[in-house]
Image (spheres, rainbow, N blue to C red):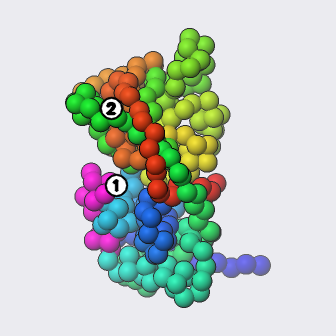
């Protein structure tokens, strides 16, 4: 018989859960540099399932990747952040483990109330080249919003909300890239991801199921787009005052997290960064 203590990340505003990588997958720095997602008043499954708008772990991540978020764990819960970093440094620098992906829960703002739920090796794959949008005044003018870029390069494609949308668009033009637009994703959406070329969601973070699945499948992916509202039943979406329907063209940047209206020219460049592989299932 195994007896375990239950820990709760949903006790109040000073509790929460998250997932953290001991290395920033967007940086060439190979040392310990925390990167990931957490959410107040939540259990770990909320973060993994992508059902929430997560907050970044570090200030560097917030300022460079998620500038719309008001705080990071580093500023909101400095003791918990410091303890996570201490654990990461011990695992990687002292014990000699390869970089890890840690799932955690904290029941208060105190370091002693941080609990690690599980850990697994972090798989990184060096990308030699990536696709980016060619800079132009039209590209700048067409910027709609910004989410969190988590995989791939840049792609312009037609919006789809369902498998029926994807099939119809592919039948009309087999060469037309299709971008699946969802509020979030669940495991049942994998067949849609297999058929789509890109993914855009309004919720979920870099460690959510949607992000990890898109990375594994090699799809361009932007998640946690706060300004995106999706009405699945009506096959419509809105970003601010702009409304979009099935077949409308949008462009997403899986590195910067930018979302643009219309179709834009792309270029292939040297990447020089690591791309995440593996992770949450």
Q: Is residue 268 magenta?
A: no
Q: Is residue 243 visible?
A: yes
Q: Nearer the viewer, residue 6 or 217?
A: 217
In the displayed orientation, state which residue is furthest to the right.
Answer: 1
Indicate the secondary structure of the residue bearing disc 1.
loop
In the displayed orientation, state which residue is furthest to the top.
Answer: 172
Q: Quadrant of residue 124?
A: bottom right
Q: Residue at x 28, y 25 (%)?
A: 242
Q: Which residue is mark 2?
A: 260
Q: Nearer the viewer, residue 24 or 58?
A: 24
Q: Nearer the viewer, residue 114 or 195?
A: 195
Q: Which mark is residue 220?
A: none
Q: Is residue 176 placed above or below 66 in the rendered structure?
A: above
* Residue range highlighted in magenta: 63-77
Q: Residue at x 33, y 32 (%)?
A: 260
Q: Quadrant of residue 38?
A: bottom left
Answer with mark 1 or mark 2, whichever residue precedes in sequence: 1
In the displayed orientation, state which residue is furthest to the bottom.
Answer: 94
- CA gap between label 1 and label 2 equals 17 Å
Q: Residues within 10 Å of mark 2 (few under 14, many from 20)?
A: many
Q: Is residue 3 left or right of residue 163?
A: right
Question: Where is residue 153 shown, x and y percent of the image?
Answer: 46, 42
Q: Residues within 10 Å of mark 1 (few under 14, many from 20)?
A: many
Q: Nearer the viewer, residue 9 or 224?
A: 224
Q: Residue at x 46, y 23 (%)?
A: 158
Indicate the secondary structure of the residue bearing disc 2.
strand
Q: Is residue 226 placed above or below 14 in the rendered structure?
A: above
Q: Is residue 66 magenta?
A: yes
Q: Which residue is mark 1?
A: 65
Question: Where is residue 163 shown, x and y percent of the image?
Answer: 59, 25
């Amino acid at each position: 018989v195994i007896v375990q203590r239950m820990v709760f990340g949903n006790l109040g505003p000073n509790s929460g859960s998250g997932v953290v990588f001991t290395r920033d997958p967007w940086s060439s720095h190979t040392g310990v540099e925390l990167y990931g997602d957490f959410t107040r008043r939540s259990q770990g499954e909320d973060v993994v399932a992508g059902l929430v708008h997560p907050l970044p772990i570090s200030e560097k991540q917030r300022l460079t990747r998620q500038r719309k978020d008001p705080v990071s764990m580093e500023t909101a819960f400095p003791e918990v952040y410091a303890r996570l970093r201490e654990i990461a440094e011990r695992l990687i620098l002292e014990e000699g483990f390869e970089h890890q992906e840690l799932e955690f829960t904290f029941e208060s703002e105190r370091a002693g109330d941080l609990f690690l739920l599980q850990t697994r090796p972090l798989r990184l794959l060096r990308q030699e080249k990536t696709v980016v949008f060619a800079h132009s005044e039209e590209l700048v003018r067409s910027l709609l919003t910004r989410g969190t870029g988590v995989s791939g390069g840049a792609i312009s494609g037609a919006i789809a909300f369902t498998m029926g949308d994807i099939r119809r668009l592919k039948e009309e033009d087999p060469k037309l890239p299709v971008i699946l637009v969802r509020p979030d994703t669940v495991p049942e959406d994998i067949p849609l991801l297999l058929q789509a070329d890109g993914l855009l969601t309004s919720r979920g973070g870099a460690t959510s199921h949607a992000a990890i699945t898109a990375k594994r499948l090699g799809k361009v992916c932007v998640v946690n787009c706060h300004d995106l509202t999706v009405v699945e039943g009506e096959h419509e979406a809105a970003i601010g005052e702009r409304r979009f329907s099935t077949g409308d063209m949008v462009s997403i940047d899986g590195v910067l997290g930018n979302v643009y209206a219309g179709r834009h020219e792309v270029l292939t460049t040297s990447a020089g960064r690591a791309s995440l592989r593996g992770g949450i299932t």
